[in-house]
Amino acid sequence: MIISQSPLSRQLQDYRLTTAEILYHMPDHPGLLQTYVWQELDLAPRYPVLRKFLDFWSRNLDGKLHSVRVANLDLISPGSLRHVDALMTLQ
């Protein structure tokens, strides 16, 4: 039995919000490129979730992959402090 993890528990295990811009050749017009944006929690730098998706794409979809551009962001990070420029009191 597989127990799915909550997004928070995955983030605590160093998963990051990963965005991939996928360019692929349109099946009916191979000379034209189409873009697809994919977003999921994944582990950098190996990206196992993205790799699984791209493997599925290559096996099951007609649009041949051209390129993939990846960016990621830590969703949980240490807090930051900053000084305020002004203090106002409402009465």
Image: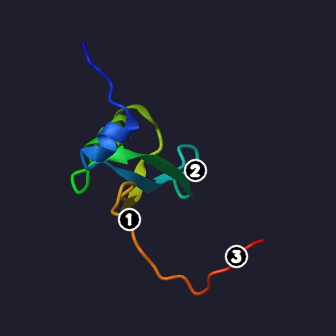
Quick one: label 1, few (<14), some, or many (20+) residues within 10 Å? few
Q: Is residue 61 above or below residue 82?
A: above
Instruction: Give the amino acid at mark 3.
Output: Thr
Using residue 69 as the reference point, say whether residue 89 is left or right of it. right
Q: Quadrant of the C terminus?
A: bottom right
Disc 1 and disc 3 in contact, CB within 8 angstroms? no
Read off the residue under disc 2: 29
Calculate the distance from the C-alpha at mark 1 to the C-alpha at mark 3: 26 Å
The residue positioned farthest toward the front in the image shown: 91
Between circles 3 and 2, the one closer to the viewer is 3
Depth order, front residue of 52/24: 52
Residue 31: percent from left, percent from top: 53, 58
Depth order, front residue of 34/9: 9
The residue positioned farthest toward the bottom in the image shown: 85
The residue positioned farthest toward the left in the image shown: 46
User: Which residue: 32% across, 30% down?
Assistant: 5
The residue positioned farthest toward the right in the image shown: 91
Instruction: Give the amino acid at mark 2.
Output: His
Please, what secondary structure does the residue beneath circle 2 have?
loop
The earlier-in-sequence mark between 2 and 1 is: 2
The image quadrant that residue 78 belongs to is bottom left
Residue 25: percent from left, percent from top: 49, 52
Calculate the distance from the C-alpha at mark 2 to the C-alpha at mark 1: 49 Å
Q: Is residue 53 above or below residue 74?
A: above
Read off the residue under disc 3: 89
Quick one: label 3, few (<14), some, or many (20+) residues within 10 Å? few
